[in-house]
Image: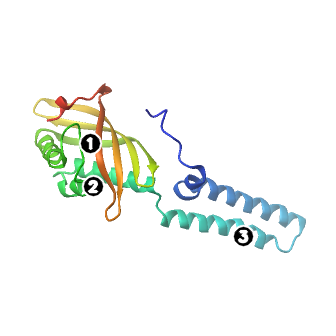
């Protein structure tokens, strides 16, 4: 699934999501212009060297201010994980990220929140780490995030790691922005997931 995940649009990614490459390249160009121009005795060397530096600063500032749809989906996925592992579980935040028509297997929104609460009554989460988080926008109003999380849980039966992989489907709502309209639990500890494993 990860191998088939599409690459983000190059220009949007370089300019807005990962501006370091462009900023470092422009800074290197500025250094070369400054060194070469300084050695050859040109008077306007500092002005020409300042131009790429100025472009790097402007580009980096724009990237910090503007969030792409993929970045918004990633941020909201991180908020969902934080809410799910919070102690106590943050059902309000989880609920705010779920569409009214959201489904997980055949569970609706209220059943998903009740199941999450029930799970936290059974298992204590000792640690949780997102090991993979990819996002893509399929249409202007639909996207997906692919999430792998490694969680160490404990219960009266002992403690153990739980590696889960999720495919989260997003819908862009005019008022709420990106909200989850379907959750797919793909695998638990690298085994295909079934609804029967849910508490």
Q: Is the residue marked by circle 3 packed among few (<14), some (14-19), or many (20+) residues within 10 Å?
A: some
> What residue is shown at x 33% (from left), y 44% (from top)?
168
Q: Is the residue marked by circle 2 packed among few (<14), some (14-19), or many (20+) residues within 10 Å?
A: many
> What residue is shown at x 49% (from left), y 32% (from top)?
3
Give me the C-alpha separation between circle 1 and circle 2: 22 Å
> What residue is shown at x 79% (from left), y 62% (from top)?
33
Q: In this view, does 167 lie above or below 81?
A: above
Compared across the picture, whether 95 is left or right of 77 comes to: left
Q: In this view, does 4 lie above or below 171?
A: above
- Of the 4 image quadrants, the one containing the N terminus is top left
The disc label shown at residue 143, or none: none
Task: Pinpoint residue 169: horizontal percent, then vertical percent.
Answer: 34, 45
Q: Where on the picture, by quarter, is residue 15?
A: bottom right
Identify the secondary structure beneath mark 1. Answer: strand
> What residue is shown at x 18% (from left), y 41% (from top)?
107
- The residue tagged 1 is 127
Colour convention of the picture: rainbow
Compared across the picture, whether 155 is left or right of 79 comes to: left
Task: Pinpoint residue 151: horizontal percent, then vertical percent.
Answer: 27, 38
Give me the C-alpha separation between circle 1 and circle 3: 47 Å
Task: Pinpoint residue 65: horizontal percent, then vertical percent.
Answer: 48, 67
* Sequence-first disc among 1 and 3: 3
Task: Pinpoint residue 183: horizontal percent, then vertical percent.
Answer: 28, 42
* Sequence-first disc among 1 and 2: 2
- The residue tagged 2 is 97
- The residue tagged 3 is 50
């Amino acid at each position: 699934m990860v191998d088939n995940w599409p690459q983000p649009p190059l220009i949007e990614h370089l300019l807005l999501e990962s501006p370091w490459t462009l900023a470092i390249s422009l800074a290197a160009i500025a250094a070369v212009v400054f060194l070469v121009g300084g050695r050859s005795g040109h008077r306007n060397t500092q002005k020409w060297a300042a131009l790429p530096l100025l472009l790097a600063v402007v580009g980096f500032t724009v990237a910090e201010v503007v969030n792409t749809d993929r970045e918004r989906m990633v941020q909201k996925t991180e908020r969902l994980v934080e809410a799910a592992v919070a102690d106590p579980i943050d059902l309000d935040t989880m609920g705010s990220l779920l569409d009214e028509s959201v489904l997980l297997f055949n569970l609706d929104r209220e059943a998903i929140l009740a199941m999450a609460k029930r799970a936290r009554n059974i298992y204590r989460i000792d640690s949780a780490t997102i090991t993979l988080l990819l996002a893509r926008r399929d249409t202007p109003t639909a996207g997906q995030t692919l999430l792998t999380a490694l969680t160490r849980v404990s219960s009266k039966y002992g403690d153990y790691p739980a590696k889960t992989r999720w495919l989260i489907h997003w819908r862009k709502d005019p008022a709420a922005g990106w909200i989850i309209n379907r959750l797919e639990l793909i695998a638990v500890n690298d085994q295909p997931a079934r609804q029967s494993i849910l508490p």
